[in-house]
Amino acid sequence: MSETASSTHITSIGRVMVPVADQDGAIEFYTRKLGFELRADIPYGDGERWVEVGPPGGETAIALVTPRDAFQPGTVNNIALATRDIDAVHAELSEAGVDTDAEVSRMGDPVPPMLWFRDPDGNQLLVVEDRGQR
């Protein structure tokens, strides 16, 4: 990776947002089914909550936010999670009852193996095997 300096003071991608209808249900799914850790659950405003989850040891978090305007649950949100073993993830998610694709997608080099799954709100997330970490 290059050591190119940013022209701004932005240093990383801190979090991505996923709209959910039920934050408690989403916390349950992301922590129990995916094994993420709950990083923040902070009340603010008039009954709102800021909720973040993420994989243990990972830098970027997923903020589980309440829907707003066009930002509604049940979309392809273009989030790609990384794994060193896509087949193990597929087996674990399937065993946990997660709505996953029936098979890992294998398009051949240079495209890495990948798998789509859906959370209880129908948000679609992608898991991609990171061959550099294998």
Image: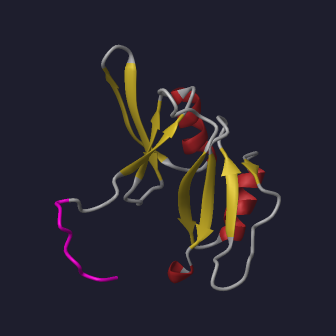
- Magenta run includes residue 91: no
Q: Which residues are magenta?
A: 1-9
Q: In the rendering, at what x and y percent does residue 112 appear?
A: 64, 77
Q: Position of residue 109 (x, y in %)?
A: 67, 86
Q: Residue at x 34, y 82 (%)?
A: 1
Q: Residue at x 68, y 73 (%)?
A: 113
How are the colours assigned in the image? secondary structure
89 lies above or below 42: below
Is residue 15 rendered to the left or right of residue 113? left
Q: Is residue 123 above or below residue 93?
A: above
- Residue furthest toward the right? 102
Quadrant of the image occupied by residue 91:
bottom right
Q: Residue furthest front?
A: 70
**Side of 23 where 51 appears, left or right:** left
Q: Nearer the viewer, residue 96 or 79?
A: 79
Q: Which quarter shows the C terminus? A: bottom right
